[in-house]
Image: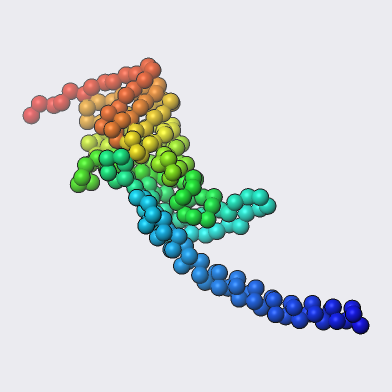
Amino acid sequence: MAVLNAHSYRVTFLRWTLPVLALLTLALAIAWPALKEMQVNKLSEQSATRLRVEGIAMTMPGAGKPVQLQMNKPEYSGLDDQGRPYVITADHVIQEGMQPGTSAMQLEKPTAQLTLDGTGKEHVDVDAATGFYDPAQKTLQLSGPVKVTHTTGYTLDLQDMSVDFIKGSGITDNPVSGRGPGGTLTGEKMEMQDRGNRIILKGRSKIILTPKENG
């Protein structure tokens, strides 16, 4: 008789529990977009940076691993130490952790734009194959090919580059080549300062100046 009672209890328990779990799962699925928006808005309110995404998904981790967030078409914006804006976008981002934009992010086809003046007409654009962005340090590690384009018409081609958005600087220890209205350049290493307004070539370097045509 005790066995029958235990079996009956388990059946009754499952009849009540399974529908409740199903409802909770459905509610989480319905509420997830709203929770995502709340998380992004909360980040925007508490920080000088902003994050916008077109879509977000969550991947459940294996044992002992953190939750992964996958974001489509993210746009991450902030200010440097002089209050000049910068914007980072990507096709796709993978981040570990539940709060969007608060921990290191792996970026596919990232682009970055650093504004040089108050109007936004002068800027430096950076494109790469992949990247790794740290929102806490505001640094972006790019791997190639990497292209840097200045609104004055200068273009740099690199294998990789480390960008510090607070300082407005970029560094690579690998060869770089560039071209523009004033000529061409090559170098074994390069340091970019003042948001691309100053380029320092290191190691074996060559600069060929193109004379301006008269008239």
Point out residue 205 in the picture as x, y percentages from the top left corner. Answer: 34, 18
Q: Is residue 122 left or right of residue 166?
A: left
Q: Quadrant of residue 46?
A: bottom left
Point out residue 61 in the picture as x, y percentages from the top left corner. Answer: 62, 54
Q: Quadrant of the C terminus?
A: top left
Query: In this rendering, does residue 130 appear at all?
Result: no
Point out residue 20 in the picture as x, y percentages from the top left corner. Answer: 64, 76
Residue at x 38% of width, y 17% of height: 203
- Residue at the extreme top of the image, as rendered: 204
Q: Quadrant of residue 121?
A: top left
158 and 27: which is toward the camera: 27
Q: Is residue 100 left or right of residue 181?
A: right
Query: In this rendering, does residue 13 appear at all?
Result: yes
Residue at x 75% of width, y 78% of height: 13
For the rendered model, the colour scheme is rainbow
In the rendered image, the vertical position of residue 33 relative to residue 64, given as above or below: below
- Residue at the extreme right of the image, as rendered: 1
Q: Quadrant of residue 156?
A: top left
Q: Is residue 49 left or right of residue 14?
A: left
Point out residue 31 in the picture as x, y percentages from the top left corner. Answer: 51, 70
Q: Is residue 197 left or right of residue 148?
A: left
Residue at x 38% of width, y 41% of height: 127
